Each structure stands twice: as structure tokens, then as C-alpha cells.
């Protein structure tokens, strides 16, 4: 009987030790889970790959953006995604998707073009800004910058002007930011940017982000939808709770230091959003307002824009606060072209 009692006591002590170890393991597991919950998932690291005719930007393992460098075609951002995977640009004609709209093939992702540069139509016509050389730089885990030398030529191959373009990609929490810094230098003949509505910094939004498809398109003046056409505004945004099956907002900001700020905008219900600092009479349809921009021989002009992509529907107040933050930032580097003869 004594041996049995001794055995029972040993078993009880062993079980108690197991319970203590189990309790410690559970405590450590709970602490680890609480720490993970508190700190959240690991941050997404930005990376990039350079291809012969394009640069692809990734946020973690996921696509952030793809920028086609031209080489015979005008330079354009052909793909752009929110952090939840929603494509905010139309794929056609560069990378068409099944079932999407196929109108206006001249409207390609995000691009810069103008309908009257020294008498040439570089919006509908051939020619435009083509990348000559480029440098891709990873600045940090959340920022990458592409610096390109761009030649603007007409259909006959005659150089109209040159440009240094900086495109900066940034991950900011769950937002994707793309900054465009364009510095144009006129040729020896000078540069005339005519007062036409087709221009200048433009985006063709994905079909789900069109106002004609039920998305809400609104601007800094409070105007919405069709009322935005020809309006002067600091920014334009388009938001949808069901873009690609998920929520997304895409915003286009103009830098307050741009000449002519706030620009007039060409906003169409089929998905075109374009900031045009060179158009006044084209929108008022009053010849007295026709004011072409003239840049003297080898003179320069600088324009900055930011595109913000959110994985949710942003309110007017949220968008305006994001624009105010952008308006206070200084340009990242002096984007001055090399004055080549």
C-alpha cells in the first residue's frame, strides 16, 4: 500500500510539472500572438525590375506599377494597382483585358501629351515624349525613383523639346503614391503650347472607376461628375466601393507651384482625367481667353503631379488633407534637363 501511495505521489508531481510547462507554453504563445497583433504584418518592401522596354515596381510580392519606357512609343504608366490588388488604370490598348472598353486608343494609362506643340498634334497624332535613357534607383525599402531623359518629337522626327522626367514610387502605409516631376526645355526654336483642351497630364481610369459605371468622381471645388469638365481644381478623385470587386480610390493632385495653378481639367464620364495648365479659351470657348504658353529658346518649364491610390473609398476631407500634405513637400531633386544642342 505504501508503494502505491508513493507511486501516486510521483505521478501527481509529474502531472503538476507537465501542467506548469503547458501553462508556460500557452503563456508564451499568447504573448507572441499579442505581439504579432500589436505590431501587425511585416512591412511591404518595395522592389523593382528593369526590362528592355519597361520597369516593373513591386510592393512585397505584389505588382505596384509598370512603366513602359517608349522606345518608339510615348512613355506611359500602363499598370497601377492599389495595395488590395485593384487595377486602377484601363489596360487597353497597351495591355487589354477581357470585356473592358476599347474607345479612344490614344488614351494609354498615365501619360503626358498635348494637342498643340509648335503646331503639331501630339495627343491624337504620332510622335510625343519617348524615353532616350533612364536610371532606376531604389532609395529605401519604401521608395524607388526612375529618372529618364525624354525626347519630344513630331511625326517627322523633328525634335520639339526635351525633358527630364522623375517618377517616384512610394509605399505609405496602405497607400501607393506616384510622383511625376516633368522639366521641359525648349529647343533653339522655342516652344509654343497652344490653348487646346487635349492635354497635358492625363490618366485613363479602369472601367469600374468611371462615373458612367457608378463611381463617384469629385474635385477640390466640390463639383462632381460631368460638372468637372473645364473646372479649375487642385485635385480630382474617383472612388468606387466595388472596383474589381473591392473598394478603391484614385486621386490626381496638382502641385500649387505649377504655372497656371489651379489648372483646368478635362474629366469625362468614360474615364479620362487630365490636368491641362495650357487651356483656358478651349474650355470657355471665348477667343479672348485664348492664351498659348510660349517658352523662349532653351527656356524651361517644370510641372509636378502626384497620383494616390487607396484600397478604400476616401472622403472629400481625406483627399483634401492628402493634397495639403503633398503641397507642402519639396521636390525630390532638381529635375533640370541637360541643354543639348
Image (cartoon, rainbow, N blue to C red):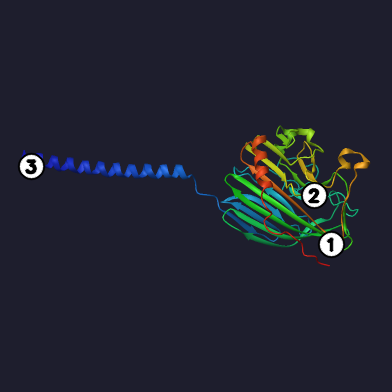
* Residue that extends furthest to the left in the rendered view of this protein: 1
C-alpha gap between disc 2 and disc 3: 97 Å
State which tag comes first along the sequence, 2 or 3: 3
Quarter holding the N terminus?
A: top left
Secondary structure under the numbered disc 3 in the rendered image = helix
C-alpha gap between disc 2 and disc 1: 18 Å
* Residue that extends furthest to the bottom in the rendered view of this protein: 341
Name the residue nearer the viewer: 264 or 156: 264
State which tag comes first along the sequence, 1 or 3: 3
- Residue 222 image offset from top left, x and y in percent: 73, 33
For disc 1, the neighbor class at 10 Å (few under 14, some 14 to 19, many from 20) is: some
Q: Which residue is drawn at 67% across and 47% down?
A: 326
- Could you say which quadrant of the image residue 332 lies in? bottom right
Left or right of residue 174: residue 120 = right
Name the residue nearer the viewer: 294 or 159: 294
Give the residue at mark 2. Answer: 259
Left or right of residue 248: residue 20 = left
Give the residue at mark 3. Answer: 3
- Residue 32 image offset from top left, x and y in percent: 39, 45
Quarter holding the C terminus?
A: bottom right
Name the residue nearer the viewer: 218 or 111: 218
Q: Is residue 99 visible?
A: no
Give the residue at mark 1. Answer: 298
Amino acid at each position: 500500500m505504501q508503494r502505491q501511495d508513493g507511486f501516486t505521489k510521483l505521478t501527481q508531481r509529474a502531472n503538476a510539472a507537465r501542467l506548469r510547462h503547458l501553462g508556460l507554453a500557452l503563456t508564451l504563445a499568447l504573448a507572441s500572438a499579442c505581439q504579432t497583433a500589436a505590431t501587425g504584418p511585416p512591412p511591404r518592401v518595395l522592389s523593382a525590375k528593369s526590362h528592355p522596354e519597361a520597369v516593373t515596381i513591386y510592393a512585397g510580392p505584389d505588382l505596384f506599377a509598370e512603366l513602359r519606357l517608349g522606345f518608339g512609343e510615348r512613355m506611359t504608366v500602363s499598370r497601377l494597382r492599389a495595395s488590395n490588388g485593384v487595377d486602377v488604370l484601363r489596360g487597353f490598348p497597351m495591355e487589354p483585358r477581357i470585356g473592358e472598353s476599347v474607345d479612344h486608343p490614344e488614351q494609354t494609362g498615365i501619360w503626358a501629351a498635348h494637342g498643340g506643340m509648335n503646331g503639331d498634334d501630339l495627343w491624337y497624332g504620332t510622335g510625343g515624349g519617348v524615353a532616350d535613357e533612364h536610371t532606376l534607383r531604389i532609395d529605401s525599402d519604401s521608395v524607388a525613383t526612375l529618372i529618364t531623359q525624354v525626347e519630344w518629337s513630331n511625326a517627322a522626327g523633328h525634335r520639339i523639346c526635351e525633358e527630364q522626367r522623375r517618377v517616384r514610387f512610394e509605399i505609405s502605409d496602405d497607400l501607393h503614391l506616384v510622383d511625376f516631376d516633368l522639366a521641359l526645355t525648349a529647343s533653339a526654336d522655342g516652344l509654343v503650347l497652344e490653348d487646346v483642351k487635349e492635354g497635358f497630364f492625363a490618366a485613363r481610369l479602369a472601367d469600374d472607376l468611371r462615373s458612367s459605371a457608378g463611381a463617384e468622381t469629385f474635385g477640390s471645388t466640390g463639383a462632381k461628375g460631368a460638372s468637372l469638365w473645364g473646372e479649375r481644381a487642385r485635385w480630382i478623385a474617383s472612388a468606387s466601393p466595388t472596383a474589381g470587386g473591392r473598394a478603391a480610390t484614385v486621386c490626381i493632385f496638382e502641385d500649387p507651384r505649377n504655372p497656371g495653378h489651379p489648372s483646368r481639367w478635362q474629366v469625362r464620364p468614360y474615364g479620362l482625367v487630365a490636368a491641362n495648365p495650357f487651356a483656358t479659351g478651349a474650355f470657355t470657348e471665348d477667343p479672348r481667353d485664348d492664351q498659348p504658353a510660349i517658352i523662349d529658346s532653351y527656356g524651361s518649364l517644370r510641372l509636378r503631379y502626384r497620383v494616390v491610390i487607396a484600397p478604400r473609398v476616401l472622403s472629400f476631407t481625406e483627399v483634401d488633407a492628402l493634397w495639403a500634405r503633398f503641397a507642402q513637400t519639396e521636390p525630390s531633386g532638381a529635375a533640370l534637363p541637360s541643354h543639348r544642342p
